Image: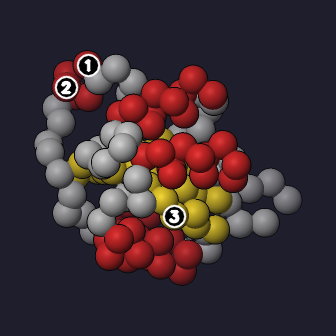
Amino acid sequence: MAQKILIVEDDVSFLGLVSEFLQDCGYTVIEAEDGEKGYRCFVTERPDLVITDQIMPHLSGIQLLGQIRSMDRRVPVILMTGYYLSKDELWSLPFTPNEYIKKPFQLTALQKIVQNLLPKPRF
């Protein structure tokens, strides 16, 4: 069974691009266009990994990360942001993602982060 990734991104064209790429890599992808939808998808779909934009309507990526952490601290979360975050800034966030990637980025760079964070499937 393919590992499930939830992508939360309000730029629909970018969401589609990342989603299609990760599907081509063999993952099952769930899409959400804002933080509130992302949280509902997290609760119902129980993904293996979450990729979320930092700035979104209704619920920011940081707020979504906090809600995810309150439910399950084991699910890895990647924060996508248009801003450079130093290690100090990253650690000063109210909730710390497992990893972050600055937009724009190469999809292969995201793929490597995903591969490093997801547990290897057991057969």
Q: Are marks 2 and 3 in contact (CB under 8 Å)?
A: no
Q: Element type at marker 2?
A: helix
Quadrant, the N terminus:
bottom right
Instruction: State whether residue 12 is above or below residue 88.
Output: below
Disc count in the image? 3
Residue 103, placed above or below residue 15: above
Q: Nearer the viewer, residue 29 or 25?
A: 29
Question: Residue at image x 36%, y 44%?
Answer: 58
In the image: residue 85, left or right of residue 31: left
Any mark on residue 101, and which?
none
Q: Which mark is residue 89?
A: 2
Give the amino acid type for the residue marked by disc 1 in the picture: Ser
- Residue located 54% across and 33% down the image: 68
Q: Amino acid at mark 2?
A: Glu
- Relative side of 98 to 25, left or right: left
Q: Which is in the foreground here, disc 1 or disc 3?
A: 3
Q: Could you say where residue 66 lies in the image, as x and y percent from the top left?
A: 46, 27
Q: Position of residue 112 (x, y in %)?
A: 43, 59
For label 1, the residue is 92
User: Label 2: few (<14), some or many (≥20) within 10 Å?
Assistant: few
Secondary structure under the numbered disc 3 in the rendered image: strand
Give residue 108's position: percent from left, percent from top: 36, 69
**What is the distance, in whole Å, between disc 2 and disc 3 at their CAs?**
28 Å
Disc 1/disc 3 C-alpha distance (Å): 28 Å
